[in-house]
Amino acid sequence: MALAKRIIPCLDCDKGRVVKGVKFLDIRDAGDPVEISKRYSDAGADEITFLDITASSEGRETTVHTVEAIASQVFIPLTVGGGIRTLEDIRTMLNAGADKVSINTAAVFTPEFVREAAERFGSQCIVVAMDAKKVSGAGEPDRWEIFTHGGRKATGIDVVEWAKRMVSYGAGEILLTSMDRDGTKSGFDLALNKAVSESVSVPIIASGGVGNLQDLVDGVLLGQADAVLAASIFHFGEFSIPQAKRYMAEKGITMRL
Amino acid sequence: MNKVAVIDYGMGNLHSVAKAVEYVGQNVAVSVTSDARTILDADHVIFPGVGAIRDCMGEIRRLGIDEIVAEVIRNKPLLAVCVGMQALMDSSEENNGVACLGMVSGRVRYFGNAQHDSDKGAGSRAGELLDVDGKRLKVPHMGWNIVKQTDKHPLWSDIEDNSRFYFVHSYYVELGAQEKASGITEYGVPFTAALNKGNIFAVQFHPEKSQHSGLQLLRNFLGWDGCV
């Protein structure tokens, strides 16, 4: 009897279409986030994260409709991130059917926004997303810094300190992405994950770098992640969600099978 | 036509539960409403809730939802979800102590250390909540956990015992001795995941987010006539 660790597929969407490509053999429309979300939910995904990378405001209207469509057909938790900057943005997404919103850049520029959001909507729906890069040199104790603009701009903020601060402001969960590992398929930054997970009381979602199923296991057992987020290994059909869950369960991790 | 009212008192996302009911229901009309007449006219009433209990109770009293709920449970089935379940109890430890509706006896407690102030955010000062192996447990309790059914209530119909449901909460219900749990979950401590009392069925987890098992529970609720 125990709480299961979670597997969360992530969909990157631009103007309501999934980008980065999803390759399922029997799917009609590989760009349709509704069809893909339904597919993942049926396969046993524990939650879905929808990351909106749409730049234009007209495009964001489309995103709201997409979230509505997903929420009326998929009955597992749905997190929406990307461009969440105001309380109104949060309200819009929750009303569309999102269960949680993920706040990234706006938290860095206006930390009080996280406090206001948690007070207004409750910590349970406020995820703070953090893009971390290792900044310590060889031989130095590990240190990671928060980066913005897709990992291009350093902020000087220490990741562990930032995580503690965001939790004290009311973040209910942390989505922790290693920008060093993102897209490399070389596994999560386990030391980063462990350092943050041990410093705060809220659940941590590990993200960035998954290349195989053992990486997911390591994220939980060595990185102390409460959930693991992955995109490409599932999108391109290299591994299925049931396969990932069975593998993790075989390694002694409690999963919802 | 099965009329379903989802009580809206301004606290958070009620659309998920309304959408899930529309998805499972046949010939249902769902209203998300705070209007007394609509709620009292419904065949089935859902009492949801998210966020901090003090704010929830404030709105429940301001809008007269307390009196409506009291009337509802006299003659029709009520499904309370998450903070909706907690609001039915005598009191909650959250926000330095808040009096609740007292329709079910018991109190709402924090996971871990009782010394806390949730105003500054869930779990920021969590005590050492430990699992059986002595490993530290995170607060909020977030994710899929096992619900052990402790009775044969009609709402469990066609749901396998020990199924997993989706939870997200930092506080849990500790029932008074005379009350009946319908389901128990363990998270550091065993707690009441579901309870029943007359026309009330209340769950700490989110059936609208618990995929097949949760949808089945909602389907069972729509087919339940209550106990009177």
Image (cartoon, rainbow, N blue to C red):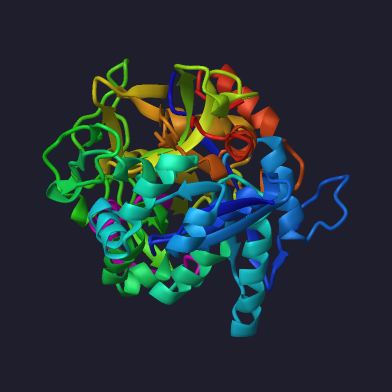
Horizontal placement of B31 versus B181: left or right? right
Q: Quadrant of residue A198?
A: top left
In the rendered image, the vertical position of residue A177 relative to residue B191, given as above or below: below
* Residue A139 screen position, x and y as percent: 30, 44
Question: Which residue is painted at 48% across and 24% down in the image?
Answer: B146
In the rendered image, the vertical position of residue A229 relative to residue B172, given as above or below: below
Question: Is B124 or B162 nearer to us in this picture?
Answer: B162
Q: Quadrant of residue A103?
A: bottom left
Does the magenta run of residues contain A38? no
Q: Quadrant of residue B216?
A: top right
* Residue B220 screen position, x and y as percent: 61, 33
* Residue A81 screen position, x and y as percent: 51, 63
In the rendered image, the vertical position of residue A186 relative to residue A144, given as above or below: above
Question: Which residue is painted at 35% across and 42% down in the image?
Answer: B169
Question: Which residue is painted at 29% across and 34% down in the image?
Answer: B104
Question: Is A57 or A228 nearer to us in this picture?
Answer: A57
In the rendered image, the vertical position of residue B201 relative to residue A121, given as above or below: above
- The region drawn magenta spans A149-175
